Image (cartoon, rainbow, N blue to C red):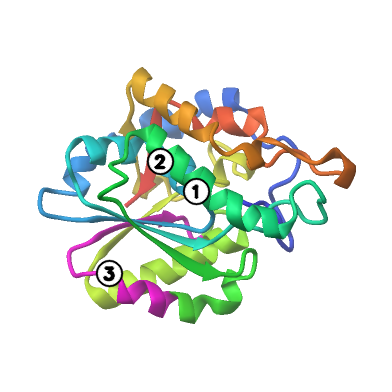
Amino acid sequence: MNAAQKDNPIVGHGTSLQQWQNSRHLAELDSIDILELVPAGARAVIIAPHPDDEVLGCGGMLQLLAAADRPVQLISVTDGCASHPGSERWPVERLSVIRPQESAEALRRLGMPMHQLKWLRGGFADTQVAAQESTLSDFIERYLRPGDVVFTTWREDGHCDHEAVGRASADAARRVGASCHELPVWTWHWATPEDAVVPWQRARKILLTPEQVARKRHAVHAFASQLEGDPAAGLAPVLAPHILERLLQPFEVVFL
């Protein structure tokens, strides 16, 4: 979920949770059953730009899929090693090892069947995915099957990697004959509740129980590197409390 990019809209505290909770658009969204989107016999493919996006964007959905024994393929496009630029506490070499480990622990906390979970690491350069977008699309295509149901970050999410992964995933899915749905992650920070840029007409809620939200919260706290900044480098935590609270509502949103 790295926030650094050129012309970065992910600045300040962003839109408050209270503003989202008062949103007419959010209140009026129809809900949809994830098991309708991923019917029996289908495979869900989660394509995450960085280790943690799969939990932040759809940690509740992953729990629902696991409980229904739906097969899941996870693709982590980058290792997230650029989340703390200039940090001696969190150098690139440390992050490249730790962040995938944090994802594994978070998925375990969600109750994912780790012995069955298919998990690919893409090895693409963090914050530089757009420069490799065509190569990424070809990479994703090799691992998709007709009938797969792909979930990835929204093509307008406000982070260069999130947007490039969204575009590449949609392109690969189209070529293979898979469906592709998008998830807002950083959108909750920079967008406003009635923002016309957000495709509300495509949006649906996946409803979560309090227990599922609690388990997602527990999983998110596996991302120790993202919960810590580095004051010596002038870096605030990537996942500050005001960011987390927007991502731990009793639903997740998917753009169909």
Element marked by disc 1 = helix
Residue 154 is a magenta residue:
yes
Q: Residue at x 22, y 72 (%)?
A: 177
Dot 2, how many residues are within 10 Å of its Cα: few (below 14), some (14-19), or many (20+)?
A: many
- What's the amino acid at mark 2? Leu
For disc 1, the marked residue is: 53
Asked whether residue 161 is drawn in magenta, I would say no
Along the line of sight, the residue nearer the viewer: 22 or 238 = 238
Residue 166 location (% of width, % of height): 45, 63
Residue assigned mark 2: 107
* 66 to 143, vertically: above or below: above
Q: CA distance from mark 1 to mark 3?
A: 20 Å
Reply above or below: 56 against 79: above
Residue at 83%, 56% in the rendered image = 86
Q: Position of residue 208 (x, y in %)?
A: 33, 27
- Badges 3 and 2: C-beta atoms under 8 Å apart? no
Residue 196, image x, y percentages: 52, 48
SS for dot 2: helix
Label 3 vs 2, first from the N-terminus? 2
Would residue 249 appear left or right of 205 to someone viewing this image?
A: right
Q: Secondary structure at mark 3?
A: loop
Percent position (x, y) of residue 62? Answer: 32, 41
Q: Dot 1, crowdedness within 10 Å: few (<14), some or many (≥20)?
A: many
Local crowd size for mark 3, using a 10 Å CA cut-off: few (<14), some (14–19), many (≥20) = many
- The residue singled out by tag 3 in the image is 144
Report whether residue 184 is seen: no
